[in-house]
Image (cartoon, grey):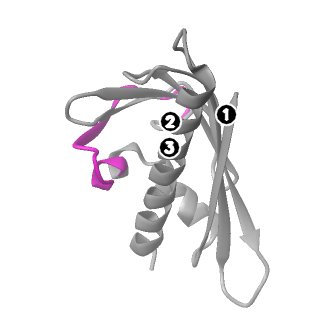
Amino acid sequence: MQSLHVSRVFEADAATVFDVISDHAGYASLPGVRRAWLRRTGDAHRDGVNAERVLDLGLARIVERITEYEPGNALGYRIIESPLPIEHAGARLTFEPLPGPTARTRVHWRSQLRASTPLAQAPVAFAIARQMAFAYGVALRIWGRRLR
């Protein structure tokens, strides 16, 4: 099992940061994502638990199911469809308010996966996890610019 973790500090309160990151439509502004939409809306909130968001990457699509939705606190999901040879154990973003005179929030993005290939599982999982960590970091930077 490969685990990855990226984090970033945002100059905004946790509720505002959560609203930006949890909105499925905003994913379309990320590099490599052509479109983003909900295949299924969440139970209590459009982007909430059991929502299924689709990320169209051009030649491929990734479908994620929201598993946790606590505004301002935590957002969890699991990749349920992907062209990547992985079994995704899940990802969780947590929103940590930071002390100080201005509103600041540290976001932690953690994910776990394993390769579903019959051979070279460890190197494949490692390579995919590194690419995902890079993509998560880029997404956090873009959202950070949007919140300035």
Q: Is residue 20 magenta?
A: no
Q: Are marks 2 and 3 in contact (CB under 8 Å)?
A: yes
**Boundaries of the magenta span:** 27-45
**Is residue 69 in sight in this rendering?**
no
Q: Given the image, on which type of amino acid does mark 1 rest? A: Gln
**Residue extending furthest right?**
99
Q: Given the image, on which type of amino acid does mark 2 rest? A: Ile
Q: Residue at x 54, y 15 (%)?
A: 116
Is residue 119 toward the left or the right of residue 103 in the image? Answer: left
Task: Work out whether 108 lies above or below 90.
Answer: below
Residue 133 x %, y %? 54, 49
Q: Secondary structure at mark 2?
A: helix
Cα distance, mark 1 to mark 3?
A: 11 Å
* Mark seen at residue 2: 1
Q: Secondary structure at mark 1?
A: strand
On-image quarter of the C terminus: bottom left
Label 3: how many Cα within 10 Å (few below 14, some 14–19, many 20+): some
Between residue 67 and residue 60, name the one nearer to us.
60
Q: Earlier in the sequence, mark 1 or mark 3?
A: 1
* Mark seen at residue 132: 3
Q: Are marks 1 and 2 in contact (CB under 8 Å)?
A: yes
Task: Work out whether 40 lies above or below 101.
Answer: above
**Residue extending furthest bottom?**
101
Label 1: how many Cα within 10 Å (few below 14, some 14–19, many 20+): some
Cα distance, mark 2 to mark 3?
A: 6 Å
Q: Given the image, on which type of amino acid does mark 3 rest? A: Met
Q: Residue at x 29, y 55 (%)?
A: 29
